[in-house]
Image (tube, grey):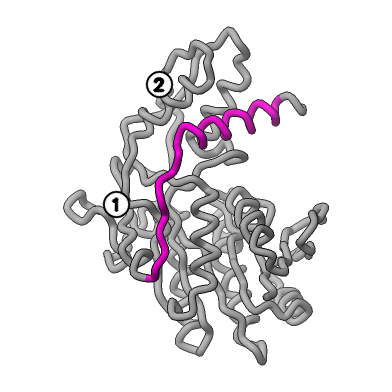
Amino acid sequence: MRVLVTGASGFVGRAVLEELRARGLETFAVSRTERPAVAGEARRVLSDPADTAEVRDLLSSIEPQFVVHLAGVSSAPSYSELYEANVVFAANLLDAALAMSRKPRVLLAGSAAEYGAVPAAQQPVREDVACRPNTAYGASKLAQTSHAFVAASRGLPVVVARLFNPIGPGMPKSLALGSFAHQIACMGARGGVLATGDLDVVRDFMDVRIAAKLLVDLSLVSDTSAQVVNICSGDGQRLLDLTQRLIAVSGVPVELQHDESRRGNSDVRAFVGDPSRLKALGLHAGPSDMDSVLDAILRSAREEISAT
């Protein structure tokens, strides 16, 4: 079984590749630049995702049975660059898949940001809630979802996996817990001051390794075409609680200091997904061992700093 994975060098992409290798699937990891391959996978370079011909050549040369599209960005210097990464690439990939004689099954990684601000009375958030994104990123991911439904109407088996808040080792410093772990790792044994934004928010956090397993499982389920499926746990956790647990795991004295300039992509106070559709497909998130995950995030940050 041949699987093509875009965004292979990203945070979620690395976890998905590890899951695919563990299952013994033939994997082709796609990235923008040359990267060393590891045992059990092949590497391909796609230099310009906006080039329709290059995208078609990539798919026709590999002839995958499954495509897991994880490539994208959360921010960009301009709207055109944001939409090129999050919409144009996906649209080209879907068209290329439609042009194949044996059409692959395609999973697109969406985002909870597509929903926008959802009232507390409508949470946990179901997939049929009206999407009203309040960020450019959320709007671009919703546009990607629209292209998925267009492709599905033309006969392509495609599903959108709407990711909530995966966390784990190697997570980018642009995300809160990734930033906090990096700051703590830089402090050393004497500890120091941890600059944070607003910690009084609730999110649906999940171990990225569990999210990766669900993404692969969802790719392989045969009856999920033309729908959106939340990749979430259904359990909300306060960012403050996880930050305090991260500090406890670190074993060093840390003082929290609020920095008004540190703001995330969303002003939504609480946001939790409904995993009912996921469960109806026979897929279950299972609990995340948060202390273990936080320890892994911190160890990864320390290893990164010690290597520089």
Image quarter (top left, top right, bottom left or bottom right) of the N terminus:
bottom right
> Mark 2 or 1 closer to N-term?
1
Please tell me which residue is depicted at 37% across the width and 51% down the height of the picture: 233
- Segment colored magenta: 281-305
Left or right of 123 in this view: 25 = right
Disc ID at residue 164: none
Numbered disc 2: secondary structure: strand
Callout 2: 10 Å neighbours few (<14), some, many (20+)? Answer: some
**Furthest-left residue in view?**
121
Q: Is residue 272 above or below residue 239?
A: below
Q: Residue at x 60, y 15 (%)?
A: 187
Residue visible at 32% across and 63% down? Answer: 131
Give the class, few, some or many, for how many residues have Cα within 10 Å of label 1's Cα (few <14, many ≥20): some
Q: Describe the element under mark 1 as helix, strand or loop.
A: loop
Residue 73: % across, % down: 57, 53
Three-letter code, disc 2 = His
Give the left or right position of residue 238, taking residue 292 as reference: left
Q: Position of residue 75 (x, y in %)?
A: 54, 49
Quarter of the image where one finds residue 52: bottom right
Amino acid type at mark 1: Ala
